[in-house]
Image (cartoon, rainbow, N blue to C red):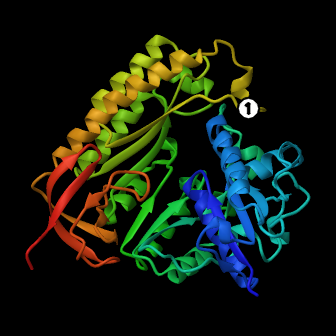
C-alpha cells in the first residue's frame, strides 16, 4: 500500500520552494500526496522562525495538525527545527521528529558545520534537489541560500548560514522543468547572487538575462538597496516586469545605522525617482520595521513622510521582534509594544490609501495579464500571493496571457473585462 504525505508550509516564498523540493523527494521515495492531512501517513510542517509571531503560528499549526491527523507520523522541519532543534523537540512531545532541512532525513550540511566545504555537500542537498513541475503558471525559484549580511534584528544567518549560490545551469534547468510562464526569483540577498562564487555584482544580471530567454516574465524579490546598481536597474527595466521589491526597513539614518544597514530616506527617494525617470510604469514594493530599539517620534514621522511622499505601490509594516542572539537585543531604548503597534497602524492607514489610489488610476486602462486560475489573474504590477489581484472573466484560459480592460477597483484588487478579439 502506498504511503501518503501532507506538507504544510509556513513563512516566506523561500520556504515554499523548500517544501516543493521535500515533496519531490517524498514522491521519489514512492509516496503519494494526500488530499487532506487527516488522510496522510506522514505530515510534514515546514516552519518559519523569523519573528515571534511566525514562531507562534508554527507551533499552533503543529498542534492543530496533531489533532487533525492523530494517526500520522508528524515531522517538524524548516527554520524552527534548524534554529531550535532539541529544544523544540523537548517542548513539543506531540511531534514524532524534529528534522533539519529535509524529510525523512536531514538534507545538506548544517550551517554551523564549518568543517565541510560546498563541494562536500551530499547529492541530495536541499538547495539543489529536483522538484515537481509547477501546478500554477508561475513558481518561486530559490537561487541562493543563506546570507552574509549581519543586520541587527535578523537571526537568519545563524541558522541558514552564509550565502551559497546555486549554479546558473542548475537554476535554468529547474525553470525549464517547472514549465511556467513566470519565474519569481527569491533568496535572502538576491542581488548578491554569485558573489560567493567570485562573480561579484555581475552574477545576477546574466542570470536574469538568461532566464528571460526561457520564460515570459522574470520577477526579482528582495533587493538590498545598496546593490541596486545602474546595470541591474537597466536589466530589470528591460524585462517585461519592471517591478522593484526593495528591502528598505526604515528611512532614518541613525536608526538604520543601529540596524546595521545602509542608506537613508533621501538616498532611497532619489533612487526611486531615477528609476521612474527611466521607466515611468515601474512598480515598487518595500517592507519597514516599526518600533526598532531607539526609534523616536522624529524617526517615525520621517518614515510617515517618506511613505506619503514617495508613493510606493505596495508596502508591508512589521513590528520589531527581539530575536535571541541578535545585536538588536543588546540595544537600549526599547520601544513599548503598544506604541510600536500604534505606529504600525498609522503607517498602514497611510499606505492603504496610496495603494487604493494607485489601483484607481488603472480604471479604464488596458493591461496584459497572466491568468493564474479561473477568474484570477495578475499583471506585472502584482507579485503572486503578495500583492493584489486582477479579477477577470472565468473563460479566459489559465496559463495564458490576455489583454483586458480594468473596469473597477476595490482596495488592492481590480476588476477587468476581456477585450473583444
Q: Position of residue 377 (x, y in %)?
A: 30, 65
> Taking 97 as reference, is 52 above or below it?
above
Question: Residue at the spot x=67%, y=45% of the render?
Answer: 60
Q: Position of residue 114 (x, y in %)?
A: 88, 55
Q: Picture quarter containing residue 130?
A: bottom right
Q: Is residue 405 left or right of residue 194?
A: left
Question: Residue at the spot x=76%, y=87% of the render?
Answer: 1
Q: Picture quarter containing residue 407?
A: bottom left
Q: Picture quarter containing residue 41?
A: bottom right
**Can I make out residue 199 in this image?**
no
Q: Position of residue 226 (x, y in %)?
A: 51, 42
Question: Residue at the spot x=46%, y=12% of the render?
Answer: 297
Q: Is residue 408 left or right of residue 184?
A: left
Name the residue carrying label 1: 326
Q: Is residue 320 left or right of residue 63?
A: left
> Taking 291 as reference, is 143 above or below it?
below
Numbered disc 1: secondary structure: loop
Amino acid at each position: 500500500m502506498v504511503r501518503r504525505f501532507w506538507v504544510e508550509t509556513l513563512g516566506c516564498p523561500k520556504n515554499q520552494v523548500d517544501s516543493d523540493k521535500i515533496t519531490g523527494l517524498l514522491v521519489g521515495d514512492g509516496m503519494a500526496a494526500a488530499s487532506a492531512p487527516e488522510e496522510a501517513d506522514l505530515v510534514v510542517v515546514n516552519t518559519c522562525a523569523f519573528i515571534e509571531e511566525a514562531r507562534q503560528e508554527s507551533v499552533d499549526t503543529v498542534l492543530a495538525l496533531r489533532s487533525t491527523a492523530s494517526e500520522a507520523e508528524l515531522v517538524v522541519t524548516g527554520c524552527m527545527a534548524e534554529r531550535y532543534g532539541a529544544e523544540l523537540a523537548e517542548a513539543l512531545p506531540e511531534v514524532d521528529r524534529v528534522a533539519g532541512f529535509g524529510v525523512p532525513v536531514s538534507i545538506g550540511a548544517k550551517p554551523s558545520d564549518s568543517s565541510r566545504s560546498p563541494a562536500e555537500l551530499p547529492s541530495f542537498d536541499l538547495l539543489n534537489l529536483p522538484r515537481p513541475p509547477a501546478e500554477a503558471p508561475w513558481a518561486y525559484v530559490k537561487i541562493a541560500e543563506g546570507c552574509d549580511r549581519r543586520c541587527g534584528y535578523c537571526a537568519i544567518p545563524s541558522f541558514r548560514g552564509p550565502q551559497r549560490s546555486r549554479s546558473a545551469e542548475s537554476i535554468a534547468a529547474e525553470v525549464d522543468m517547472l514549465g511556467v510562464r513566470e519565474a519569481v526569483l527569491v533568496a535572502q540577498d538576491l542581488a548578491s547572487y554569485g558573489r560567493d562564487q567570485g562573480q561579484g555584482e555581475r552574477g545576477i544580471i546574466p542570470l536574469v538575462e538568461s532566464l528571460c530567454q526561457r520564460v515570459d516574465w522574470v520577477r526579482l524579490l528582495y533587493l538590498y538597496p545598496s546593490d541596486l546598481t545602474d546595470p541591474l536597474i537597466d536589466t530589470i527595466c528591460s524585462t517585461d516586469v519592471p517591478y522593484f521589491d526593495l528591502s528598505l526597513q526604515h528611512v532614518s539614518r541613525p536608526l538604520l545605522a543601529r540596524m546595521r544597514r545602509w542608506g537613508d530616506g533621501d538616498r532611497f527617494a532619489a533612487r526611486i525617482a531615477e528609476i521612474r525617470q527611466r521607466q515611468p510604469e515601474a512598480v515598487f514594493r518595500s517592507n519597514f520595521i516599526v518600533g526598532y530599539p531607539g526609534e523616536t517620534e522624529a524617526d517615525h514621522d520621517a518614515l510617515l513622510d517618506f511613505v506619503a511622499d514617495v508613493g510606493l505601490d505596495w508596502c508591508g509594516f512589521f513590528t520589531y521582534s527581539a530575536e535571541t542572539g541578535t545585536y538588536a537585543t543588546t540595544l537600549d531604548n526599547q520601544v513599548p509594544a503598544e506604541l510600536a503597534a500604534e505606529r504600525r497602524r498609522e503607517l498602514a492607514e497611510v499606505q492603504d490609501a496610496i495603494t487604493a489610489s494607485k489601483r484607481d488610476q488603472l480604471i479604464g486602462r488596458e493591461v496584459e495579464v497572466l491568468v493564474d486560475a479561473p477568474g484570477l489573474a495578475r499583471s506585472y504590477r502584482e507579485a503572486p500571493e503578495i500583492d493584489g489581484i486582477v479579477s477577470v472573466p472565468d473563460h479566459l484560459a489559465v496559463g495564458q496571457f490576455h489583454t483586458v480592460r480594468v473596469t473597477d477597483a476595490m482596495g488592492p484588487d481590480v476588476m477587468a473585462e476581456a477585450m473583444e478579439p
